[in-house]
Amino acid sequence: MRLGDYQALWLLWSLPFLAAFYGYSFTRKGRVLKQFAAVELLRKINPQVSIRRQLSKAFLLLLSAGSVVVALTQPGWNPRPEKIARRGRNIVVLMDVSRSMLAEDLYPNRLEHAKLAVGDLLDVLDGDRVGIVAFAGSCVVKCPLTQDYGFVRMALVDIGPESINRGGTNIGDAIRKATEEVFDRQERDYKDIILITDGEDHESFPLNAAEKAAQEGVRIYAIGLGDDREGSRIPITGSDGEKTFLKYQGEEVWSKLDSYTLGKIALATGGKYWQVGTGTFDLAELYSSSIAPAVKKELESTTIMRYDEKFQIFLALALGLLVLEAFISERKKI
């Protein structure tokens, strides 16, 4: 027999307390009755009361509670092997971690807003493999393609501007990194890139990289974050905790969204561009509308043991014991 939920066994500790409660109740009731009359007189006054029957009813209630606990453990038997094929696509998230992503025109800033959205995406994935590439002036694979979404979340938490030791925003290099090192180059289909950035590229030829990725069967979904008109300043916190803003040649730097470049990148691969700006966006919705309906491949197969769940037997037993307890009278026949 297999138990589906071993944690429910902790409820068995309630049975001794329930038994102790019944014991206390019987003892307390006996003491109260003795205050009114002697034991021999009580037997003559109410000869039909049966202590044995009262104990039997309490015992049946305890058995019923125990049966409910066993049912909660989800018992099952008759194991049989079952092969499960997991189907999905390969999805790489390109996460811009440049300092411009610290701009606060999205709450709490562009980068943290993006990380929350990726976390929401992981909640709706169904069999797809996910990887993460962090990029700024250079790029690094923070998480290879995997179906272990817990591991992806751990990698996501650690992503920040300190993940890359070179400043800038080289989108083209990040696309090439994903296409050449993360995806399987022997396979043309089932490959998607979700590019999350403010689009301020520094001469890495991102459109050329996108066109080459399209030849490898990669679709790019670009997510543009930030104000595309006035832009936003980039906050810097000093060692003394004082907040200032990034400056270049004595002037404060204002980071603006480059929608034009991102739109052309997405168009070149047959993907889509979402101009989030300073609003909100839902990667789960993007996945459901554009990625999930696409053709999927069999990524891996695994064999699991299926059991016939029999919790109904113990629930029926608990109900039967309760019915039996209700039909047993505390009084004996004379």
Image: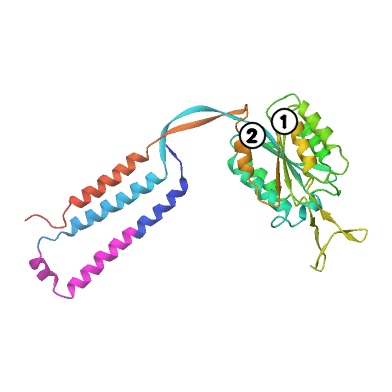
Across the whole image, how many numbered discs are drawn on residues? Answer: 2
Residue 156 included in the magenta stretch of the image: no
The three-letter code of the residue at mark 1 reads: Gly
* Residues shaded magenta: 18-46
Which residue occupies 68% across, 35% down? 91
Q: Main secondary structure of the magenta part?
A: helix
Q: Which numbered disc covers residue 270?
A: 1
Few, some or many residues within 10 Å of mark 1 (<14, 14–19, 20+) = few
Q: Secondary structure at mark 2?
A: helix
The residue labelled by disc 2 is 291
Lower sequence index among marks 2 and 1: 1
Residue 206 in the image, given as x and y percentages of width and height: 83, 37
State the quadrant of the N terminus.
Answer: top left
How is the protein colored in the picture? rainbow
Residue 174 can be seen in this image: yes
Q: What's the CA distance linking mark 2 and mark 1?
A: 12 Å
Q: Is residue 39 above or below residue 282?
A: below
Few, some or many residues within 10 Å of mark 2 (<14, 14–19, 20+) = many
The three-letter code of the residue at mark 2 reads: Ile
Residue 10 in the image, given as x and y percentages of width and height: 44, 52
Residue 19 included in the magenta stretch of the image: yes
Q: Secondary structure at mark 1?
A: loop
